[in-house]
Amino acid sequence: MERALFVIFALTAIVAALNVLLRRHPLHSALALLVVLGALAGLYILLGAYFLAMIQVVIYAGAILVLFLFVIMLLNIRAEEARLARRPFLRWLALPFALLLGAEIFYLVRTFEENPVPSGTSVGVTEAIGRELFTTYLLPFEVTSILILIAILGAVVLARRG
Amino acid sequence: MGMGVVVEAVVKIVIVFGIVLTCLAYLALFERKLLGWIQLRYGPNRVGPWGLLQPLADLLKFLFKEDVRPTTPNPILFSVAPILSLVPALMTYAVIPFGDRIELFGREITLYITSVNVGLLYLFALSGLGIYGIVLAGWASNSKYSLLGGLRSAAQLISYELTLTLSVVGVLIQVGSLDLVEIVRAQSGTYFGLIPKWHLFWYQPLGFLLFFIAAVAETNRVPFDLPEAETELVAGYHTEYSATKFAMFYVAEYANILAVSALATTLFLGGWNGPGVERLPLLGVFYFAAKTAIFLFIYIWLRATLPRFRYDQLMRFGWKILLPLAFANIVFSAAVAATAG
């Protein structure tokens, strides 16, 4: 049962990810990305990481991707495409980046050590995540929040100038 | 997992769906009747006694009307959008606790479909997904009114979702669980044998107010119904929809209203709690329904009394008033929780 579900979610994620790349229209790509995020959330649930799965949908699907759609619908995408078409060498950048990503995945798979979480533990539970976030990882957590604050300030400055 | 568990789950899902869909049909009638009374009219009273068969007539009309399609470059998205808006709305009922548990046929049966330890997050995830149906409907209709309605809705939902999410953090601090069943259990009992231990009374009145205002905005209802402001946008995102597809948006809107009312009951009004529930658990379902009905009434009351916000007012209200208040409520709740132990 679990294996079947894994295969379904994984295949969905891969097919949708290919669609993100291959679709012509940016809106269709964004929708394919939505499917990828949903399938990943399914995989997280299979791993017992319920909190992560739900946060994934709330943040990425519920907020960030909606902003993507918003931008796609409001802006004139055709102009952007024309700008890209004038610089064909940008296309060739894809090759080194793909190689880099491939090497990264290869390295990760080679050095991967199977270290399964014993069942019945509370690693994926909200309380455990909160505890870790506010003790072990307090500094990175606070630094991230400052980073987000700076981004907000930057957005305000840019909006005022325009 | 035994066969009995599966059968039990399926039976519960079927029953909940049946009851919820019936309630939605009669919620539409209730709204028209109540609006009529408030405006000194009778409301629908031709089909059946007191117009009680009106929902059935409406259903038949929706099913047999011609399905008009606009010329659009996205016919598939046009058809999928209503489904995307209806499915998340109906999925919310999987975690809403209607009652505690009862003994039936020698089995202990819980009066909710399932109880997950991230229940509240699950609901927020679904409410986030509900945006897609509206936005895509606006986009796929290939009409400027629909597109504007869809975009307005996206902006409004993102803005008020922040307040909605933050307003329940106070409750979470108090209960220490995202599980809706746990949240209801925490509200059982009374203070001094008189005031029930609902979160509404025990230092979450502000959280409750923020939650309800944000919830009205999230369901696109008056006075926050800008996505379908008929004087400016015809009907907003569903201008081009007709027949069954329009019915889906219609049902989705009522499903969201009912879900949000049920959620407000669960989080702030003690869910199924009430006098005598310990001895007679089935009574809890009636308490739950009665409390939810209060919210439904307020929803329609608002619609009959308040004018619509202007768009800039809506945004200013959401970002400059509601959101800071929601943050203040979190700080306050944390402070009280810290001092009270």
Image: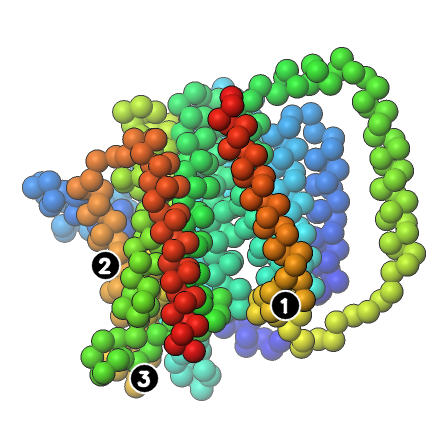
| Circle 3 residues within 10 Å: few <14, some 14–19, many ≥20 | few
Please provide percent x and percent y for residue B246: 39, 36
- Of label 3 and label 2, which has the lower sequence position? 3
Q: Nearer the viewer, mark 2 or mark 1?
A: 1
Tag 3: amino acid: Glu
Asked where in the image residue B274 lies, by quadrant, the reply is bottom left
Which residue sits at x=22%, y=45%?
Answer: B302
- Give SS at disc 3: loop
Which residue sits at x=18%, y=42%?
Answer: B304
> What residue sits right under mark 1 in the picture?
A135
> What residue sits right under mark 2 in the picture?
B294
- Give SS at disc 2: helix
Query: Is A81 positioned to the left or the right of B147 in the image?
Result: right
Please provide percent x and percent y for residue A9: 70, 53
Q: Chain of mark 1?
A: A
Q: Nearer the viewer, residue B248 or A40?
A: A40
Q: Chain of mark 3?
A: B
Which residue sits at x=44%, y=47%?
Answer: B161
| Circle 1 residues within 10 Å: few <14, some 14–19, many ≥20 | few
Please provide percent x and percent y for residue B209: 30, 55
Q: Is residue B153 visible?
A: yes
Query: Is B294 positioned to the left or the right of B10 in the image?
Result: left
> What residue sits right under mark 3 in the picture?
B278
Q: Nearer the viewer, residue A93 or A45?
A: A93
Q: Is residue B11 visible?
A: no
Spatial distance from mark 2 to mark 1, Cα to Cα? 43 Å
Query: Is A125 positioned to the left or the right of B292 in the image?
Result: right
